[in-house]
Amino acid sequence: MRTPRAARALLAGVYLRGIGLHRRPLPGEEPTALQPEPRGAAINTQRVQGFSSSSDCALQVCVVGSGPAGFYAAQHVLKLQKSAIVDVYEKLPVPFGLVRFGVAPDHPEVKNVINSFTQTMHHGRCSFYGNITVGKDISVEELKQAYHVVILAYGAQDNLMLEIPGESLHGVYSARSIVEWYNGVPGIQNLNPDLSCETAVILGQGNVALDVARILISPIDLLKKTDITSYSLEAIAASKVKRVLIVGRRGPLQVAFTIKPRPRKRLTELMVKTALEKPSAKEAKRQEEAAKEWGLRFLRSPVQILPTSDGKHVAGIRLSVNKLEGSGESLRSIQTEELEDVECGLVLSSIGYKSHPISSSFPFDNKKRVIPNHLGRVLNTPGLYCSGWVKRGPTGVILTTMNDSFETAESVVKDVKSGSLNLSVPKAGFSAVQALLQQRGVCLVSFPGWEKINEAELAKGAKLGKSREKLSNQEGHD
């Protein structure tokens, strides 16, 4: 059995072999086309224009995570601090986090922010290093030794569990795993969700729930032009799912999903109109002829996932009928004794995410599942900052994350100007980390390496008549 590190090394190799690149050489090996320019070693020993004191040296900044939280933090630090050199680390071989792997394939406009992130990576003082897991390949403590500033922006990578009987039955998945499956997250293409039933139930009424429901029942002709993975497109084309129920424990006024750019008032008006007004003859005919349907079920909480007679597969789900008590911030959904069984063969949990600590060297709130901080400064840990979901919790949209990350970057710059961060001692930055990674046999992917991957994906997609065909570690194993 391969170790996690060996599996990731193989994965990076598969990505790069498909485009004519190879892994970073180990000590004693000849460099390849993937070898990034030795920017760090050259710049670390030089003064950078814009320093206020001859005693100051380059501000070495490390960002852990290449999703929106990481990139926005990097962008703002580079903008505000002309002395900063920023390195972005990512555990996957490719950048952009949830923008690449979380946004639904049929919402390409949301992914346009990648253009801005790409400009950031072309900045002369910014670099990307993928396929590096902080906390395993390199520790937070080692990063702090190499950099003046470490910004943790690694998100919320764990799913909240339902914690009800039947959760381990075949046919129960996290909605996140389905998203990663159709978006091509490396290593998950073999998920093979069972789509042989007619009814699917999604627990949770956030944007992810709506995305998954829409993808499961969208016309194939619409999906095949997107960057959805070919293996998931094939599975969805053969799917027998005709009906998707999206279940929430609270009422329609408390739904978590949003419809950009409509405010909640208009969203509520739309739901009320749809529920109470009689559809036009044309719309009624369209609904009657529709081969697939979806619906919202409010004031329901899962109690048990019901098994088939052999006790192995999902046969249905038992829901409690809820009532609302309180008002405003104190509003709560309370389960009643009334129960309701829904027949289904697929249950997808979309009730939220949680962060986890990647080191014991910094504080972590296990109840709120965030890093305790003040304006992005990790409490009682000088030089360590946080941004995004690991800072505030898994809420908000990309704009929320942008503002959150700018706040953290501004805290960094204020600490530089106030002298809270000591720049009189030079830091080696990536050159120190590079030496450790080479000793440990970690193969990384630089941004030029990613751009080769990007070119290959676009070319492959063009041949298939779609925007992109993402490479996966399935390729190269046939």
Image (spheres, rainbow, N blue to C red):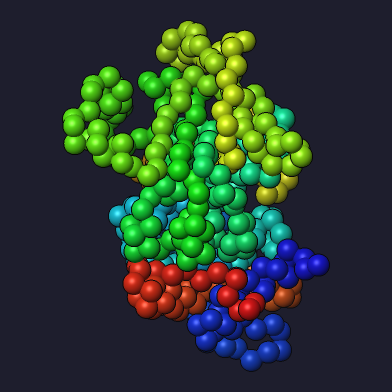
Residue found 36% across the figure and 53% down from its top: 219
Residue 49 location, quadrant: bottom left
Left or right relative to 328: residue 185: right
Q: Is residue 166 left or right of residue 324?
A: right
The image shows a total of numbered marks equal to: 0
Q: Relative to the observer, which residue lies in front, 215 or 366? A: 215
Instruction: For the C terminus, give its image quadrant.
Output: bottom right
Q: Quadrant of residue 93?
A: bottom right
Going by the image, does 298 lie left or right of 276?
A: right
Above or below for 339 versus 357: above
Q: Position of residue 410 (x, y in %)?
A: 41, 46
Q: Position of residue 65 (x, y in %)?
A: 53, 56
Q: Whole-percent x and y of residue 115?
A: 33, 63
Nearest the viewer among 425 and 336 is: 336
Q: Is residue 322 visible?
A: yes
Nearest the viewer among 130 and 242 is 242
Q: Residue furthest right?
A: 1
- Residue 80 visible? The answer is no
Residue lying at 41% horizontally and 77% vertically, measured from the top left: 460
Q: Quadrant of the N terminus?
A: bottom right
Which residue is drawn at the image coordinates 60% and 50% (left, top)?
194
Against 359, residue 469 (above or below) is below
Image point (66%, 31%), residue name? 305
- Rendered view: 274 above or below 3: above
Residue 45 shown left or right of residue 161 in the figure? left
Question: Residue 18 in the image: x percent, y percent?
Answer: 53, 81
* Residue extending farthest top: 326
